[in-house]
Image: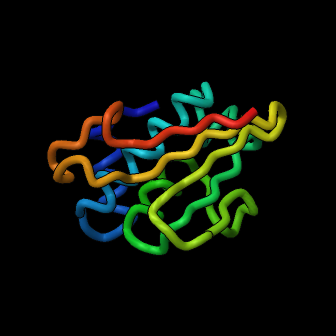
Amino acid sequence: MESIDELLVKAEAAHGHLCAGQILGVRMALLGLERLCIADPRGADRKRLVTYVEIDRCATDAIGMVTGCRLGKACALWLGKIRANWRVRSTRMWSRRAASRCSPIANLRMDSCFASRRFA
């Protein structure tokens, strides 16, 4: 997996500009993938992952770019808020990321700024 800086450059290119939503989406996706032990979401693990995105703004593009999950590939669903969920198809494990109001976007810390739930 690329570094966060490389992913932000790719997210900017895919979305058209770099904004707070892109940064948030990349961080949410990375944390969700880490919690589910998905190392290569756009390669070897691409058939294992389904993403449920609950926002229709900038973060959605970043989440799709990091995970490789898109609406046209039948592995992304849009639900309408500022949360994203990932599911590993074979194990039925879930990871849920939600943005919180704990700090300005520039100072986001993955551990303290994301609510997490794990469903088995």
Q: Image point 43% across, 46% down: which residue? A: 28
In the rendered image, which quarter is residue 111 located in? top left
In-front residue for pair 37/98: 98
Q: Image point 57% across, 27% down: which residue? A: 39
Q: Image point 48% across, 54% down: which residue? A: 63
Q: Is residue 64 above or below residue 89?
A: below
Q: Is residue 74 above or below residue 43?
A: below
In-front residue for pair 11/56: 56
Q: How is the image coloured?
A: rainbow
Q: Is residue 62 above or below residue 35?
A: below
Q: Is residue 110 above or below residue 103?
A: above
In the rendered image, which quarter is residue 80 located in? bottom right
In the rendered image, which quarter is residue 42 located in? top right
Position of 37 with respect to 111 (left or right) is: right
Q: Residue 38 in the image: state x and y as whole percent.
A: 61, 30
Q: Image point 73% across, 38% down: which residue? A: 88
In-front residue for pair 75/31: 31
Position of 64 with respect to 7 (left or right) is: right
Position of 20 with respect to 27 (left or right) is: left
